[in-house]
Image: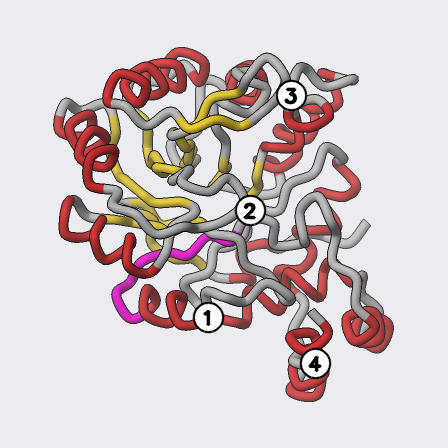
Amino acid sequence: MTTLNIAAAGTFPLGDRTVKRLGYGAMQLAGKGVFGPPKDPEAALAVLRAAVDAGVDHIDTSDFYGPHITNQLIRQALHPYGQDLTLVTKIGAVRGADASWNPAFSAEELTRAVHDNLRNLGLDVLDVVNLRIMFDVHGPAEGSIEAPLAALAELQHRGLVRHVGLSNVTRTQVAEGRAITPIVCVQNQYNLVHRGDDALIDELAAEGIAYVPFFPLGGFTPLQSTALSEVAGQLAATPMQVALAWLLQRSPNILLIPGTSSVAHLHENLAAATLSLPPAALAALERIKTEG
């Protein structure tokens, strides 16, 4: 197996921490549909330990993954946590008994969610909490975020949350949020095909704010593209490695959190840290915007 060097992808500030730009997203450790326990809990624990062993110092999670399952797995695998490990969670939703994703925006619901994350992760304070806006489950939708963000900021003032981020938001909501409390990261859907946040990424980079794309590999519908496959073949890489490398080269403030429930796939993703895309490859990948 090729020796992994995820430090080659560089680092970027995340609040008062500096993390490697290639991290790990724990969503896929729960059962099918991000609901219930995994078929093989030991395999899930092995992936978490392998990620940290490979140098990952940024893990993204939420207590509504499972619900509760993913955070409990993280605690079982990694607690007590190393001082250089940054755990980022999110609140703003709850799961229904039918596995649905439902808004949970009230101050009481957000407070309960923070305490659930603290308990299940085994922490006294959460490093970073992203407020996921659920005006539309499928993507950002306009509307004021003042009330829920003010409630989260109050929890921050009480010392339960160190830093605040936003998820599933518009540029207008990012500006509104920054007027309420410092925002250290924005987590939206973005990848080679889904590129609606191009301008936002550049604006955040100029302000030193991290952008963390979810579904960097397409999520529940993996990326498929002729141009992507051709570039991967030319570089003796996998299409997913190329897609991750493209994101790393897109902007220095992008932090990646690709998820997997397989150690082999984890190592494949992390190997993207050392994959450099030449100008011809980058030009070929631009065709994917049209294909998408």
Q: Are marks 1 and 2 in contact (CB under 8 Å)?
A: no
Quarter where residue 165 is shown: top left
Q: Amino acid at mark 3?
A: Phe
Q: Earlier in the sequence, mark 4 or mark 3?
A: 3
Which of the image's four quarters has the C terminus? bottom right
10 Å crowding of disc 1: few (<14), some (14-19), many (20+): few
> What residue is at 42 percent from the left and 32 percent from the top?
89
> What residue is at 34 percent from the left and 49 percent from the top?
14
Q: Earlier in the sequence, mark 1 or mark 2?
A: 1
Q: Amino acid at mark 1?
A: Asp
Q: Earlier in the sequence, mark 1 or mark 3?
A: 3
The residue to which callout 3 is attached is: 35
Q: Going by the image, does 223 lie left or right of 196?
A: right
Any part of residue 187 in sight: yes
Q: Amino acid at mark 2?
A: Ile
The residue to which callout 1 is attached is: 198
Q: Amino acid at mark 4?
A: Arg
The residue to which callout 2 is attached is: 257
Q: Which residues are magenta?
A: 206-213
10 Å crowding of disc 2: few (<14), some (14-19), many (20+): many
Q: Going by the image, does 95 lie left or right of 159?
A: right
Quarter where residue 259 is shown: top right
SS for callout 1: helix
